[in-house]
Image (cartoon, grey):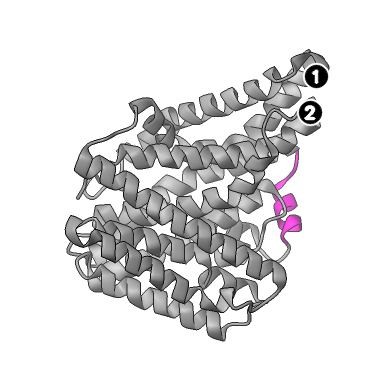
C-alpha cells in the first residue's frame, strides 16, 4: 500500500482551510469591519486539528505499515519528517519577527519557561506556548513531532508488520498515564492527550485497510477502544472546561477516523477520486497553515492603506484568502517541493 490517496489530500486541504478561515475571522473584523466569514467556522478549528492528526497517523502507516522496520528505516523516517517540518517553520518564525518588528528576545519573553533554542527545535519546553499565533502553531508541531518520534521507535523495535502490537502498547500507556498523571499538569496532558489517540486512530484505520473483509469490524473495535481510553475524561475528571473539551475531541476524533477510512476506501476499492486541483491544495496545506496569519494580516494592512475599508465589503477578506492560497502554493512549489525532492525517495510519506 504505497498509493497516494487524492481524496485524503483534499480532506487535508479542507481541514487546513477551516483553520485558515477561523484565524482570518478576527482579521476580517479588525481590519474591514465585516463578517463575511461565518462565525461558526471558529468552532470547527479544533475539529480540523483533530482531523489533521488522524490523517497524519493514517498516511505514515500506509507508507510504513508493511516495512521490515529497523533502526535504519526509523532514522530515515525521522529525517524526512524533519526536512519537511523545520525549514519552513524557521522561515515562518523569521517572517513573524520581521512583520512584528520584534527580536528573538520577544519570543523568549512571550514564553519565559522556553529558551529560544527549544523553540527553534520544537522541544518539550516550548509545548505550553499558545499566546501568540506562531507559538500556538509551534505547540501543534511539537505534538506532531512527539507522535512521529514514538512512531519511529515502534518501527525500529517492532517493524511495520507488527505495528498493531506497538500501537496497542502506546494506547495502553496513554490510558494508564492519563489515569496516574495529575490532570492539571500540562506536559502529561500533551503526552497522554487526545492528539496522540487521534494519530493512533488514523494508524489503526490504515492497518484495517490492508484487509477489506475485516476492515469494518476493525474500525468499530477501534472506536470502542477509543471510548474506553477516553473514560477518564468522560467521567468528568478535571475541570468542567477540560471535560467538555475532551468530549468534543472524542466526537471529532471518531468522526475524523470514519471520514478518513470511508474516503480512502472509496478511492482504493471503488475508484472514486476528487478533482486533482483539490488534492493539489492539500499538497500545499503545510505552508498555507504556517503563513496564513502573517499573509492575511499583511494583505489586510496593505489593502486598508490603499482603499477605504468601508468600500471593500467582502472583497477585502476575499483578497486575503486568495493571497494565502497563492503564497502557500508558491512556497510549496518553490521551497517545500525542492526540499522534499532531495530526501531519499524510498518509503516517501
Q: Decide whether residue 108 is among the magenta residues.
A: yes
Residue 276 or 153: which is nearer the viewer? Answer: 276
Horizontal and vertical percent for residue 212?
A: 19, 55
Measure how far apart labels 1 and 2 are at the Cα level: 7 Å
Horizontal and vertical percent for residue 150?
A: 39, 68
Identify the mark at residue 26; answer none if there is no mark: none
Picture residue at 43% right of the left edge, 32% below the top: 281
Residue 217 image-quadrant placement: bottom left
Q: Residues within 10 Å of mark 2 (few under 14, many from 20)?
A: some
Identify the mark at residue 309; answer none if there is no mark: 1
Do the CB atoms of the residues marked 1 and 2 lie less than 8 Å apart? yes
Look at the image and tell me whether residue 215 can be seen.
yes
**Element marked by disc 1:** helix
In the picture, measured across the screen, residue 127 lies left or right of residue 208, that is right
Q: Decide whether residue 71 is among the magenta residues.
A: no
Horizontal and vertical percent for residue 201?
A: 39, 62
Look at the image and tell me whether residue 148 can be seen.
no
Residue 222 or 98: which is nearer the viewer? Answer: 222
Residue 61 or 258: which is nearer the viewer? Answer: 258
Residue range corresponding to the magenta coloring: 101-111
Dot 1 or dot 2, earlier in sequence: 2
**Element marked by disc 2:** helix
Residue 258 image-quadrant placement: bottom left
In the picture, measured across the screen, residue 123 lies left or right of residue 302, that is left
Identify the mark at residue 31; answer none if there is no mark: 2
Picture residue at 45% right of the left edge, 61% below the top: 198
Taken as a whole, is the magenta stretch helix, strand or loop? helix
Horizontal and vertical percent for residue 204?
A: 32, 63
Q: Residues within 10 Å of mark 1 (few under 14, many from 20)?
A: some
Picture residue at 58% right of the left edge, 71% below the top: 189
In the picture, measured across the screen, residue 268 lies left or right of residue 137, that is left
Amino acid at each position: 500500500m504505497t498509493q497516494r490517496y487524492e481524496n485524503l489530500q483534499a480532506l487535508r486541504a479542507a481541514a487546513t482551510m477551516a483553520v485558515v478561515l477561523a484565524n482570518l475571522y478576527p482579521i476580517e473584523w479588525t481590519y474591514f469591519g465585516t463578517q463575511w466569514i461565518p462565525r461558526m467556522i471558529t468552532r470547527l478549528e479544533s475539529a480540523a486539528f483533530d482531523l489533521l492528526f488522524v490523517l497524519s497517523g493514517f498516511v505514515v502507516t500506509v507508507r510504513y505499515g508493511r516495512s521490515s522496520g529497523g533502526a535504519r528505516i526509523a532514522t530515515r523516517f525521522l529525517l524526512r519528517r524533519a526536512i519537511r517540518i523545520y525549514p519552513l517553520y524557521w522561515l515562518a518564525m523569521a517572517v513573524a519577527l520581521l512583520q512584528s518588528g520584534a527580536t528573538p528576545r520577544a519570543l523568549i519573553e512571550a514564553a519565559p519557561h522556553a529558551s529560544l533554542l527549544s523553540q527553534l527545535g520544537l522541544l518539550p519546553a516550548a509545548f505550553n506556548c499558545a499566546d501568540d499565533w506562531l507559538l500556538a502553531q509551534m505547540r501543534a508541531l511539537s505534538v506532531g513531532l512527539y507522535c512521529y518520534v514514538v512512531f519511529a521507535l515502534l518501527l525500529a523495535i517492532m517493524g511495520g508488520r507488527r505495528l498493531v502490537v506497538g500501537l496497542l502498547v502506546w494506547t495502553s500507556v496513554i490510558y494508564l498515564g492519563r489515569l496516574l498523571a495529575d490532570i492539571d499538569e500540562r506536559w502529561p496532558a500533551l503526552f497522554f492527550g487526545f492528539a496522540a489517540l487521534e494519530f493512533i486512530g488514523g494508524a489503526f484505520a490504515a492497518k484495517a485497510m490492508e484487509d477489506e473483509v475485516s476492515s469494518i469490524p476493525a474500525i468499530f473495535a477501534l472506536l470502542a477502544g477509543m471510548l474506553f481510553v477516553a473514560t477518564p475524561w468522560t467521567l468528568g475528571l478535571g475541570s468542567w472546561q477540560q471535560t467538555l473539551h475532551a468530549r468534543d475531541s472524542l466526537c471529532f476524533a471518531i468522526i475524523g477516523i470514519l471520514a478518513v477510512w470511508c474516503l480512502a476506501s472509496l478511492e482504493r476499492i471503488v475508484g472514486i477520486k476528487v478533482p486533482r486541483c483539490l488534492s493539489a491544495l492539500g499538497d500545499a496545506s503545510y505552508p498555507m497553515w504556517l503563513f496564513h496569519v502573517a499573509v492575511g494580516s499583511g494583505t489586510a494592512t496593505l489593502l486598508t492603506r490603499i482603499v477605504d475599508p468601508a468600500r471593500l465589503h467582502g472583497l477585502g477578506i476575499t483578497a486575503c484568502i486568495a493571497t494565502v492560497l497563492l503564497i502557500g502554493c508558491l512556497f510549496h512549489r518553490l521551497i517545500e517541493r525542492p526540499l522534499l525532492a532531495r530526501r531519499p525517495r524510498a518509503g516517501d510519506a
